[in-house]
Image: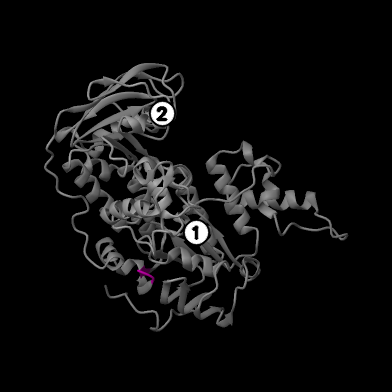
Amino acid sequence: MSQLKTAHSSSEDFPPVLALQNICKNFTGVRALNNVSLNLYPGQVTALVGENGAGKSTVVKILTGIHQPSSGEILLAGEQVQFATAHHAASAGVTAIHQETVLFDDLNVAENIYIGHAPRSRFGLIDTQAMRQQAKALLDDIGADISPTAMLRDLGIANKHMVAIARALSIDARVVIMDEPTAALSHKEINELYVLVEKLKSQGKAILFISHKFDEIFSIADRFTVFRDGGFIGEGKIKGVNESELVKMMVGRPVDQIFPTRQPDLGNEILQVSKYCHPTEFDDISFTLRRGEILGFYGLVGAGRSEVMQSLFGIKRPCSGTASVDGKRLEIRSPADAIAHGIVYVPEDRGKQGAITTLPIFQNVSLPSLQQTSRRGFIRLAQEFALTRKYTERLDLRAAALDQNVAELSGGNQQKVVIAKWLATQPKVIVLDEPTKGIDVGSKAAVHEFMAELASQGLAVIMVSSEIPEMLGMSDRVIVMREGRMVTELRGDSLTPETLVRHAAGIGEE
């Protein structure tokens, strides 16, 4: 890894546009950043790589003026600066495109793009015509066919993301931060984003790119910087490092075996689903699940996998069909019914559906298990903490304390809170919907190990995933869905990447 260097070694032929030097950031009882450094060069993409909890989000908040460093220096074009507020950072030309866009449904596209810095007339009023014209020019520039007068609520997720990009570029940006920008995009839209990044590079903008997807990092980045546990590990040119070396820097150890070795010991059938139908989402779904089994559900976006699982959990109501646990037919009218029968569901959107992020960890974990932690109608705090500690320790949750708010945790640790919450109910069947989406390679390995442990203890696991390696590495068998229907069941030698994709896309076997 000849290109690897420390943060204090000689710079490139041109100086960085923006540099962080020896930055520390302390929160109450926690040091989030410890002497980290970061260099962003004009016309180059720097990938910031690290596990969840490595300090990436804290750095982004410092660069955008949301947090102030406890110590260290921020240099903009070689001059020391201080971003006291988000407005100061934006005025200096630092802008960010976040994974979860914060837009306003009741405003139109142009208003969303220019909110807070709209063009003004000579009388100091907002110049609506100029704002719409400038918004149209920005949207055209990034290849977004969106009307500046369209209401945001009428747009799809991908178009909302393009509006967020246009808003970030509506200031004269020198530094563009892209924090998991492809999370809500299709393959076509991701390719369009790559084209946009190349255009920004040609304009001399420095780009900080944060992603957990290694294929994106190696496709788009010129340079990399690695953080681990709030500290700087190294930086270099992306051409001078391979994937395994980068992973080793991230986690402090080689990750040769991503998926745990399993020898399934399958028990009796615990879940039977027969001819499950929904008026608009899925039709004729029938399958069984055995104790100790990991059953994968694969399909393209819109195949109906999540909708089937939400129906089993009482979120959606099927119009016909039956579900049984241990041979007992169920009437699932609500999530409470599903939980009572031993079925729990870890949703894909952990932030909005899986946890109450404004509440502390212990209250999230104990919420579905209040009968275990209450006596005569009163919640016993000691029991809440004991229950939470039992399951978060099993998942190796990393947090300052159990009374820390879930919103302050990294994505991987938030996922562990959601899983711990449902394990505390002592379920028979656990459904994991995209269990490793948006989390780093180290946290993925931890989730996979724990899934294997749960199965070995006799818990029945359903895993919905769009990641083919995860399907192949974790599933005992896989059901493939397309357009709301089951199209095949694969196992053993028939379970290959090619067969998964062919059946999911409806491509005939050769």
Regarding residue 195, the answer to whether it shows in the image is yes
- Picture mark count: 2
Determine crowd level at label 1: few under 14, some 14-19, many 20+ residues with C-alpha closer than 10 A: many
| The stretch drawn in magenta includes residue 406 | no
**Mark found first going from the N terminus, 1 or 2:** 1
Tell me if 411 is positioned left or right of 15 in this view. left
Q: Could you tell me which secondary element the residue under label 2 belongs to?
A: loop
Q: Closer to the observer: label 1 or label 2?
A: 2
Please give the name of the residue rendered at 67% of the width and 50% of the height, measured from the top-left corner.
112
Q: Residue 178 bears which disc, if any?
A: 1
Tell which of 373 and 296 is nearer to you. Answer: 373
Q: Residue 486 bears which disc, if any?
A: none
Quarter of the image that includes the N terminus: bottom left
Q: Which residues are magenta?
A: 226-230
Cα distance, mark 1 to mark 2? Answer: 37 Å
Q: Could you tell me which secondary element the residue under label 1 belongs to?
A: strand
| Residue at the right extreme of this rendering | 123
| The stretch drawn in magenta includes residue 228 | yes
Tell which of 345 and 403 is nearer to you. Answer: 403
Q: Is residue 116 above or below residue 275?
A: below
Q: Is residue 76 above or below residue 477?
A: below
Please give the name of the residue rendered at 57% of the width and 66% of the height, measured from the top-left corner.
66
Which residue was labeled with disc 2? 314
Tell me if 151 is positioned left or right of 238 in this view. right
